Image: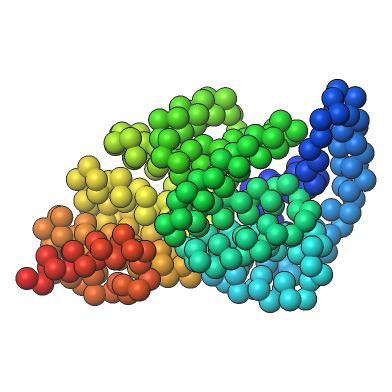
């Protein structure tokens, strides 16, 4: 059974109050006080049920958590099968939907992620954590699919909901989520300041998932602000925590970002080694999009270091249709430069 440090759904399941439906009211202090007592009663009454269902899931499908920990492609396939035999809107079904959305995002299947997120948000009521996660995935998929205005509206809505959740039950991972959304809104300075405060506030937190997310977002903020020194430093920290956490796909992503950091400052040998390791983890996890993105990055690094033969070799491995539009443009440009 997955632990808090290995499961994409873990921090939402760990805080059972996150599963309460939203209730908006203007009834004043008395209602707020009763709401707090109601929250406590709800937590106590559902604790045993949650533990029972979680244990049953682990016993009946012992591999679903471990698969979703390390291989999003296999996770997506297994979850699709399990969803067909699971009662809709049950706690187990909601957990599987969380795995599904996470895998779709990691595999960059953004059109399907948009459809699944929209369909999920049309259900009422949803547990607050799943509602906000679905809205975040919807927002990100919209922005990536060039529906920027609608995506940004959902990002602002998600930030408001995350802050509301954190007022009820504080959770550092949700704070990292807020910073991540600032990055999607191109508010890089605000995100970096926010994340640096979190780093100081939670410097004794040893949870690998939290630290991997924290340092991963810090590295992205530094990269977008042109701060190469902290881009490298935080990318190395992300990889360190990723290795502890053990998600093969995320380790591949961490190697990719570290390689980009090295490549950007001209440390090509280190960049190529990072990309090579990233390719191995991408293949292990079954993430073909990541694998072929890394072939492209490796080809660029080989060319920049003066080895055009190896650059062509890696470029020949790339399946262009697996790249996002921006990377497809880089592929075409590099191919034009190499085959003149």
Residue located 58% across and 29% down the image:
202
Left or right: where 100 falls relative to 243: right
Residue located 33% across and 54% down the image:
274
The spot of residue 75 in percent (x, y) is: 60, 68
Position of the N terminus, as image quadrant, is bottom right
The spot of residue 292 in percent (x, y) is: 35, 68
Q: How is the image coloured?
A: rainbow
The spot of residue 172 in percent (x, y) is: 62, 35
Vertical comparison of 318 with 246: above or below: below
Q: Looking at this view, is 6 or 73 the one in front?
A: 73
Q: Looking at this view, is 9 or 135 the one in front?
A: 135
Left or right: where 107 falls relative to 61: left
Determine if residue 272 is in view: yes
Left or right: where 101 falls relative to 109: right
Determine if residue 99 is in view: no
Q: Looking at this view, is 337 or 297 the one in front?
A: 337
Position of the C terminus, as image quadrant, is bottom left
The spot of residue 138 in percent (x, y) is: 56, 55
In which quadrant of the rendered view does residue 301 lie? bottom left
């Amino acid at each position: 059974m997955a632990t808090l440090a290995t499961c994409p759904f873990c921090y939402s399941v760990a805080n059972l109050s996150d599963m309460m439906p939203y209730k908006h009211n203007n009834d004043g202090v008395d209602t707020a006080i009763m709401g707090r007592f109601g929250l406590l009663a709800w937590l106590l009454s559902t604790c045993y049920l949650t533990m029972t269902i979680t244990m049953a899931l682990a016993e009946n499908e012992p591999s679903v958590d471990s698969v979703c920990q390390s291989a999003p492609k296999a996770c997506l396939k297994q979850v699709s099968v399990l969803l067909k035999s699971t009662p809709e809107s049950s706690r187990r079904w909601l957990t599987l939907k969380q795995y599904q959305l996470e895998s779709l995002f990691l595999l960059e299947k953004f059109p399907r992620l948009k459809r699944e997120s929209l369909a999920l948000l049309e259900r009422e009521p949803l547990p607050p954590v799943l509602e906000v996660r679905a809205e975040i995935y919807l927002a990100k998929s919209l922005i990536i699919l060039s529906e920027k205005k609608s995506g940004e509206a959902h990002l602002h809505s998600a930030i408001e909901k995350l802050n509301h959740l954190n007022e009820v039950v504080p959770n550092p991972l949700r704070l990292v989520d807020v910073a991540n959304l600032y990055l999607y809104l191109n508010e890089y300075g605000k995100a970096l300041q926010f994340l640096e405060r979190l780093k100081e506030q939670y410097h004794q937190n040893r949870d690998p998932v939290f630290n991997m997310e924290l340092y991963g977002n810090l590295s992205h903020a530094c990269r977008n602000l042109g701060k190469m020194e902290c881009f490298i430093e935080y990318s190395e920290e992300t990889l360190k925590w990723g290795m502890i956490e053990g998600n093969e796909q995320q380790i591949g992503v961490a190697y990719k970002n570290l390689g980009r950091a090295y490549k950007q400052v001209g440390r090509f040998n280190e960049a190529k080694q990072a990309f090579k390791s990233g390719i191995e983890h991408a293949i292990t996890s079954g993430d073909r999009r990541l694998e072929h993105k890394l072939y492209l990055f490796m080809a660029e690094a080989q060319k920049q270091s003066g080895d055009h033969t190896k650059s062509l070799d890696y470029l020949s491995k790339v399946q262009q249709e697996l790249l996002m539009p921006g990377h497809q443009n880089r592929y075409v440009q590099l191919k034009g430069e190499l085959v003149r």
